[in-house]
Image: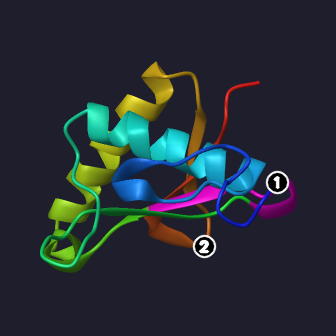
Amino acid sequence: MGEDKPEFGFGAAGRPLWSVRDRDAEAIRSVLRTAGRREFGERQDGFVVEGGNDGAPFVIACTGNAEAAGVAAAELARYEAALLTAGYRVELDPADDQVLQAWPPS
């Protein structure tokens, strides 16, 4: 695998997918984008996907104005529904009710 050729190709906006973790995080992003959810970016609020290293769950949160009272809960419910439909195991983070944990389908 050369430095200019990621093992798992490229995700949205040319994001390099160097590892299984990168590939799986991009799969979550793809499910959420397909469900009409926006990804956080320079000029927009939206979801972020982090974690997923060494068997740990991925964490999904909404950012920016989406953190306003009630908006985050509704947005997380949409994320959860999309991920469950795609076969992911999804739970609220026990330490933070503004964050979902997700595990890829087996």
Magenta residues (range): 53-60
Left or right, 93 with respect to 2, comes to left
Left or right, 60 with respect to 78, comes to right
Asked if residue 51 is positioned above or below residue 103 in the image, the reply reads below
Instruction: Please tell me whether mark 2 sits on a helix, a strand or a loop.
Output: loop
Q: Which mark is residue 95?
A: 2
- Nearest-to-viewer mark from 2 and 1: 1
Contact check, label 2 and label 1, Cβ < 8 Å: no
Instruction: Please tell me whether mark 1 sits on a helix, a strand or a loop.
Output: loop
| Image point (33%, 51%), residue name | 76
Left or right, 75 with respect to 71, comes to right
Asked if residue 41 is positioned above or below residue 26 in the image, the reply reads below
Choose top left, top right, bottom left or bottom right for residue 1.
bottom right
Amino acid at circle 2: Ala
Q: Is residue 6 inside the magenta stretch?
A: no
Choose top left, top right, bottom left or bottom right for residue 94.
bottom right
Q: CA distance from mark 2 to mark 1?
A: 38 Å
**Residue 6 in sight from this viewpoint:** yes
Q: Earlier in the sequence, mark 2 or mark 1?
A: 1
Q: Which mark is residue 76?
A: none
In this view, the residue in front, 62 or 73, is 62
Residue 68 percent across, percent down from the top left:
15, 75
Residue 99 percent across, percent down from the top left:
47, 64
| Image point (38%, 50%), residue name | 12
Left or right, 94 with respect to 7, comes to left
Asked if residue 87 is positioned above or below residue 13 in the image, the reply reads above
Amino acid at circle 1: Met
**Total residue callouts:** 2
| Image point (12%, 76%), residue name | 43
| Image point (14%, 70%), residue name | 44
Residue assigned mark 1: 1
